[in-house]
Image (cartoon, rainbow, N blue to C red):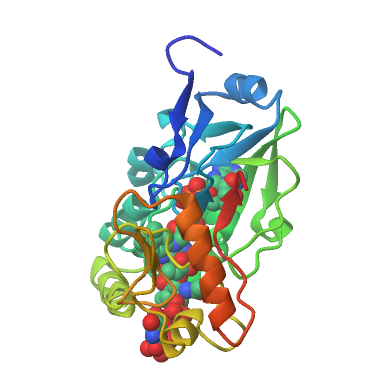
Amino acid sequence: MSQAESVASSMPLASLTTLHVGGPAEVWLAASSADLAEATAAPFLVLGAGSNLLVADRGVDRRVIRLGPRYNDLDDFRVDPKGWLGAATPLPGLVRRAQRFGLSGLEGLLGIPAVLGGAIAMNAGTRFGSIAEVVDEVELFVDGELVRVSMADLRPGYRRTRLPADAIIVRARLRLGDSTPERVAEAMQSVDTARDGQPKITSAGCAFKNPPGDSAGRIIDEAGLKGMRVGNAMVSHEHGNFIVNLGQATASDVMTLVAQIRERVPVSLELEWHLWGF
Ligand code: FAD
Ligand code: EPU
């Protein structure tokens, strides 16, 4: 890899995920397409902010690629909010700045601790809107080349996209509306209120997707499972679809809890989390 900018090192993925669970991997920090070409020469996984991942205790044997600070264009957003933004740009920062500049479209994404690439890959959203609605074009690194596709080409759905195999989202161009800081702040207020019932402690967001027309959190709550605990992994008392890490929980604790929840609810629940290393 090119000197100084890029590093490949072994580290516990617990330190790179919001649930703080998971064993080691060889993590490649990429600063350029040349780095990506080198890093993708062997089987790999792509890591964003790690806020929707459960990583096995034994870690993963594939390379884990992260886009480095060169792919964080938060500071350029002010200069050209309609320009290309790197996939490592933090979503919370974009949401805040869009509000400050009076640009609408991102307010529904308030409180999602992703980076731009991970948010697009998952089509992150809330009932107030999803990121696919405000992304025009996406630049992918795939088969050693950069290609530009429209967001529609990625066929976004509920908490998913259909990315080509081994494609890495490297940049995206947003399509935001002209508004005022006051109006955007007002719209953000409802999103903030909708999040009041979510836990603030260590988690990876909702564990399960909502079944059509219902809420997994409500179903888990109604089954009386809040507070159910395996080791230091616990179903949040605040929201049934959040599993929280009370400290030093293992992936095995979390998976056992997931299995116990599934056994005790009357419907089949699909994981929203992506599983690595299982
Ligand atoms: P990661 O978790 O790092 O990765 C998720 C998937 O995307 C992986 O398969 C990964 O390989 C892939 N990926 C990541 N980056 C790239 C890339 N550059 N190119 C290709 N693939 C990539 N989600 C919601 O939708 N709505 C919410 O309201 C919400 N609230 C949350 C609240 C909390 C407190 C937490 C912890 C999580 C919440 N989440 C929510 C879940 C999570 O933030 C989203 O799924 C988010 O989109 C994950 O982004 P990330 O950057 O962390 O991706
Ligand atoms: N509810 C309960 N008990 C609970 C949790 C929820 O009764 O423990 C009830 C609520 O009272 C409400 C209904 O279920 O009537 C829906 O709850 P909420 O508004 O909290 O929304 P949700 O469907 O549980 C979804 C997303 C969240 C997103 C919120 C806000 C999914 C799986 N979850 O949660 O996304 O933040 O809406 O729009 O789609 C995520 O995907 O990680 C995530 C956090």
Q: As drawn, is 145 to the left or to the right of 269?
A: right
Q: Which of these two is toward me, 194 or 75?
A: 194
Residue 248: x %, y % from top left = 33, 48
Residue 138: x %, y % from top left = 62, 47
Q: Which of these two is toward me, 142 or 172?
A: 142
The mark tally for this picture is 0
Q: Which of these two is toward me, 141 or 264?
A: 264
Residue 277: x %, y % from top left = 61, 43
Tell me the residue at 61%/70% (across/down). Answer: 158
Residue 260: x %, y % from top left = 52, 72
The answer to which image quadrant residue 198 occupies is bottom left
Residue 116 visible in the shown view? no
The answer to which image quadrant residue 181 occupies is bottom left
- Find the residue positioned furthest to the left: 182
- Find the residue positioned furthest to the top: 3
Tell me the residue at 54%/45% (across/down). Answer: 56
Above or below: residue 75 compared with residue 121: above
Above or below: residue 110 compared with residue 226: above
Q: Which of these two is toward me, 198 or 223?
A: 223
Tell me the residue at 33%/79% (across/down). Answer: 194
Quadrant assignment for the N terminus: top right
Tell me the residue at 41%/49% (across/down). Answer: 81
- Find the residue positioned furthest to the front: 231
Residue 69 visible in the shown view? yes
Above or below: residue 233 compared with residue 163: below
Q: As drawn, is 78 to the left or to the right of 215?
A: left
